Image: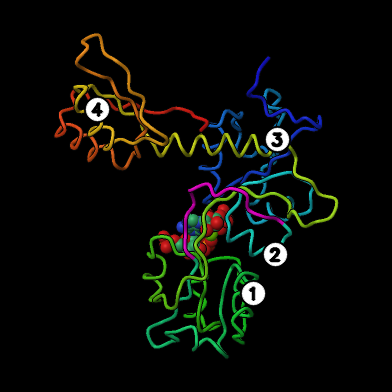
Amino acid sequence: MSTTSTTSTDGSTLRVAVPNKGSLSEAAHDILAEAGYRRRRDPKQLRMVDPDNDVEFFFLRPRDIAVYVGSGTLHVGITGRDLMLDSGAPAQEVLALGFARSTFRFAAPEDGPRSVEQLAGTRVAAAYPGLVRRWLEGRGIEAGVVGLDGAVESAVQLGIADVIADVVETGTTLRNAGLQVFGEPLLESEAVLVVPDGTQAGQTRHPSVDVLARRLTGVMTARRYVLIDYDVRNELVEKAASVTPGLESPTVSPLHDSGWSAVRAMVPRADTNRVMDELYDVGARAILVTEIHACRL
Ligand SMILES: Nc1ncnc2c1ncn2[C@@H]1O[C@H](COP(=O)(O)OP(=O)(O)OP(=O)(O)O)[C@@H](O)[C@H]1O
Ligand SMILES: O=P(O)(O)OC[C@H]1O[C@H](OP(=O)(O)OP(=O)(O)O)[C@H](O)[C@@H]1O
Ligand SMILES: [Mg+2]
């Protein structure tokens, strides 16, 4: 009877890879829980079956997720765009998820290289060596890449590299290491939903991937928008509606007092107060804002 199950039409359980720890993990678990999937109880759990949704979750290192998905052994996963590209695995992004945002940038001491052109002949330290090598090759720049596991910012001071290429979020770690960014970002990254590369022979997308993607999109929309309701005199409806056009068009309903209408529309959360001020100026009253808990557009 349920129409919300992710049960696939081909009868096989959807196998989903989720980051087990690190920067992506908590937000990935949150968005899945908001999308109606079972939440992991124990952070050491490696695998969890969610029978209500006919999904099996595998909690893996974020760096490995594109490798599993690309091999076809798991149907879909959540990882970082940068991690997916670094792996070189035959996986492709189907949905950007809006969290774990970062930029990937070159940085060096003040007296080091200050432009991409000056990278030739240098040693670049990176925890994403595949991504950096491909980026340099794509531009015909011949530089050595020193692959490290992390704390890359120390590599210059410790003498094994001239430049680093790393994830920058606030820039605090770079500043503390006396490094400055230069050149354009190599990449803008965020968490993404990945599936096996469509070009791989013999691999077809599991039908429940689309249900998962729709649910996650619904959560992102519910987070990004609020619902606004207000009353306005009939002659002012058009003017007020132009302030709150909604996604398609606002809902306008008659009030018991025939001179007034009630209007309802979705508004970007970030615009809420500006929109309320404008509506009040137009003459709207009883302006109410409510959360959207879930939606399918
Ligand atoms: N401040 C940040 N540090 C590291 N990764 C970040 C940061 N902000 C966003 N990210 C993103 O999170 C992903 C890295 O996840 P991962 O779990 O490997 O990171 P981590 O927190 O550095 O874990 P670890 O401690 O194992 O290195 C990448 O996609 C990266 O772009
Ligand atoms: O710009 P910031 O806000 O300072 O964040 C970026 C830093 O955070 C991450 O390091 P992490 O703490 O994951 O350590 P690691 O380098 O050992 O992975 C990343 O590798 C950068 O070093
Ligand atoms: Mg790290």
Callout 2 touching callout 1 (CB < 8 Å): yes
Q: CA distance from mark 1 to mark 3?
A: 33 Å
Q: Quadrant of residue 4?
A: top right
Given residues 15 and 222, the one toward you in this image is 222
What residue is disc 2 on? 88
Disc 4 on helix, strand or loop? helix
Disc 3 on helix, strand or loop? helix
Q: Is residue 98 found inside the magenta-colored segment of the image?
A: yes
Given residues 161 and 207, the one toward you in this image is 207
Residue in view at x 69 percent, y 33 percent: 48
SS assignment for the magenta stretch, majority: strand
Q: Is residue 214 left or right of residue 284?
A: right
Ligand 1 within 8 Å of the CB at mark 4 = no
Residue farthest to the right?
Answer: 202
Callout 1 touching callout 3 (CB < 8 Å): no
Closer to the N terminus: mark 1 or mark 3? 1
Q: From which residue to which does the magenta span run?
A: 91-103
